[in-house]
């Protein structure tokens, strides 16, 4: 069975938490299903898809043919309702990814998809399953093959969004290997991956240091408040100063 047919079958499972193969299911609600991508291109890579049938707020369901691909969904009068449901689920999934990881969500353009699905992926792109230029350019956040969910929703709401031609998207896959960190191009994928690993380590360390400093600062404020409470002093303001030390306006 092809991957597209597998996704279609997963979306139709009435009890995916019990019926999907081990290691596939992440979460679901009445309208959406989130699974681990079987061909992950980063440390964290999930697929969020509408379930079939997809219940509409006003009753009834959206047609299965409208859920075949992004292009078919965009032709449906219920496209925004489906997109918003996927957006809510994607936001919850992104909360589950480690704090120091950058995340993005969107579609890769592909006319062959058998069931529309949204990618939620960390930006490290450090996966042994990312094997060639096509894989890299498919998920590069700035080239245009990866279509950001926020851009699609905004464009649908104001009527400005439309998909480009197949030739346009396929031409993107042939572009050089370019880093989205600094714009430099690399002759081979192994060299690009070495660069990605270096950037991941640097940015991860910086973000972990920021999170640690913020926590220590909050802990310090809490300790001061507790000490002053026991001493009978006025509690600290959010900036760490006692309100009694601040001059009154107009004084």
Image (cartoon, rainbow, N blue to C red):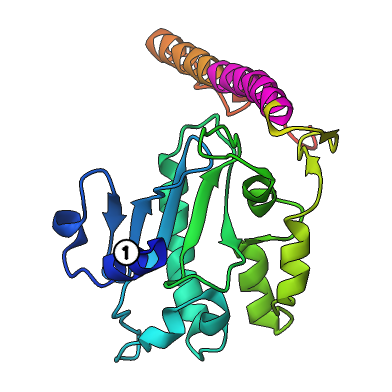
The quarter in which the N terminus is drawn is bottom left
Relative height, residue 198 to residue 65 (above, below): above
Relative height, residue 100 to residue 49 (above, below): above
> How many circles with numbers are drawn on the protein?
1
Q: Which residues are magenta?
A: 191-214
In the picture, measured across the screen, residue 23 lies left or right of residue 192, that is left
Q: Secondary structure at mark 1?
A: loop
Residue 197 lies in what quarter of the image? top right
The main secondary structure of the magenta stretch is helix
In the picture, measured across the screen, residue 24 lies left or right of residue 77, that is left
Q: Is residue 213 magenta?
A: yes
- The answer to whether residue 32 is visible is yes
Residue located at (47% from left, 16% from top): 219
- Relative depth, front residue between 251 and 240: 240
Measuring from the top left, give residue 97's x and y in whole percent. 45, 38
Measuring from the top left, give residue 222's x and y in whole percent. 46, 18
The quarter in which the C terminus is drawn is top right
Residue 13 lies in what quarter of the image? bottom left
- Relative depth, front residue between 220 and 187: 187
- The answer to whether residue 241 is visible is no
Q: Is residue 229 magenta?
A: no
Which residue position is annotated with label 1? 1
Residue located at (51% from left, 12% from top): 220
In the picture, measured across the screen, residue 176 lies left or right of residue 39, that is right
Measuring from the top left, give residue 2's x and y in whole percent. 38, 64
Measuring from the top left, give residue 242's x and y in whole percent. 60, 20
- Relative depth, front residue between 91 and 230: 91
Residue located at (65% from left, 19% from top): 206
Query: Which residue of the protein is positioned furthest toward the front in this rendering?
Result: 1
């Amino acid at each position: 069975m092809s991957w597209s047919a597998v996704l279609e079958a997963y979306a139709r499972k009435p009890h995916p938490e019990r019926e999907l193969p081990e290691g596939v299911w992440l979460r679901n609600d009445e309208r959406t299903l989130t699974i681990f991508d079987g061909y992950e291109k980063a440390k964290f890579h999930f697929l969020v898809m509408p379930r079939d049938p997809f219940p509409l707020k006003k009753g009834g369901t959206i047609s299965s043919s409208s859920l075949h691909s992004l292009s078919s969904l965009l032709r449906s009068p219920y496209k925004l309702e489906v997109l918003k449901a996927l957006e809510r689920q994607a936001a919850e999934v992104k909360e589950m990814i480690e704090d120091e990881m950058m995340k993005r969500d969107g579609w890769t353009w592909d006319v062959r998809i058998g069931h529309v699905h949204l990618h939620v992926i960390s930006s490290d792109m450090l996966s042994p399953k990312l094997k060639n230029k096509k894989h890299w350019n498919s998920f590069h956040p700035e080239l245009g093959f990866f279509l950001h969910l926020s851009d699609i929703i905004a464009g649908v709401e104001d009527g400005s969004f439309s998909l480009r031609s197949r030739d346009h998207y396929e031409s993107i896959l042939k572009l050089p290997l370019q880093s989205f960190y600094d714009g430099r191009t690399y002759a081979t994928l192994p060299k690009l991956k070495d660069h990605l690993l270096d950037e991941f380590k640097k940015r991860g360390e910086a973000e972990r240091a920021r999170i640690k400093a913020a926590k220590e600062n909050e802990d310090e404020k809490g300790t001061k408040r507790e000490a002053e409470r026991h001493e009978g002093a006025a509690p600290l303001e959010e900036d760490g100063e006692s309100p009694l030390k601040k001059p009154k306006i107009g004084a």
